[in-house]
Amino acid sequence: MLEMKNVTKIFNPGSIDEKLALDNLSLTVSEGEFVTVIGGNGAGKSTMQNAICGTWLPDSGSIFLGGVNVTSLPEYKRAKYLGRVYQDPMMGTAAGMQIEENLALAARRGAHRSLRPGIRKSEREEYRRMLEELDLGLETRLSAKVGTLSGGQRQALTLLMATMQKPRLLLLDEHTAALDPKTAAKVMQLTDKIVRENKLTTLMITHNMRDAIEYGSRLIMLHNGRIILDISGEEKKKLTVANLLEMFTKASGNEFANDRAILS
């Protein structure tokens, strides 16, 4: 479903601020895989995800989504293949619109628009059913403005909107990082449920080592723009934070320097 071949990205080339963000990185993600991505600050996690989205084009290498070469496609043309949830709960929804209006926009993504106004009764019932499964009380608040929701409610709604059209690839960019621990745990449980039920191919960046170990079928760790660990199957099931830190030290020759990830 995703294939990155020898992708390299250098920011500010030739200047004192030159930064090799992705170093000949290659990654293949099969259909239905749930991959968690972890690494220290500046490891290349967000750069990798932004390269997939087309936020910027790689200096070399190629990127395929569902067998389609998207390497040179602009961001808006790649959007039809992707669902994305950001770290900031404010980014995935329109605050001034109602919950049902946000859902209607997500449902109509990529479809031909007509002059027919409003949301059909059948649509409204479907939205109510979907929200009820979130177990956040939103099914009784369809007409509420999204800006009145809590961060956790808004992030759960964003997750629902990002997955309504069953994207080829779901990208989660530290989507629980801005939430308190209890709310973050709830959103992670919802994420796991939605991904499993819809068999979505998923790439989740997280700062939380415990989440990276607990969720998903595969774990990769980045360092200096390269993948230095790729763990799946029984090996992943037996992982602990201590094991992961030890493996990182052996693979990179450095100690893992991200207190937030270790303490989460």
Image: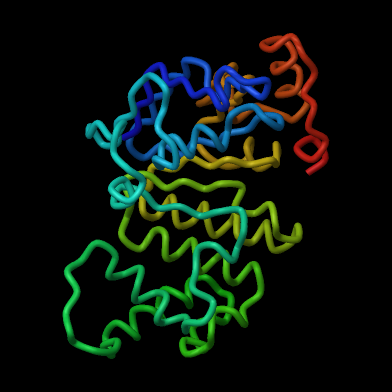
Picture residue at 56% right of the left edge, 46% below the top: 173
Q: How is the image coloured?
A: rainbow
Residue 48, percent across and down? 50, 32
Q: Is residue 237 left or right of residue 9?
A: right
- Quarter holding the N terminus is top left
Q: Is residue 28 left or right of residue 10?
A: left
Residue 45, percent across and down? 58, 33
| Location of residue 251 with respect to 5 vertically, above or below | above
Which residue ends up furthest to the front in the rendered image? Answer: 15
Residue 19, percent across and down? 62, 22
Q: Is residue 212 left or right of residue 260?
A: left
Q: Nearer the viewer, residue 184 or 257?
A: 257
- Quarter holding the C terminus is top right
| Location of residue 103 with respect to 36 vertically, above or below | below
Picture residue at 59% right of the left edge, 66% below the top: 90
Q: Nearer the viewer, residue 40 or 129?
A: 40
Q: Nearer the viewer, residue 41 or 27?
A: 41
Q: Quadrant of residue 68?
A: top left
| Location of residue 163 with respect to 133 vertically, above or below | above
Q: Quadrant of residue 223?
A: top right
Q: Is residue 160 left or right of residue 15?
A: left
Labels in figure, total = 0
Q: Quadrant of residue 184?
A: bottom right
Picture residue at 49% right of the left edge, 73% below the top: 94
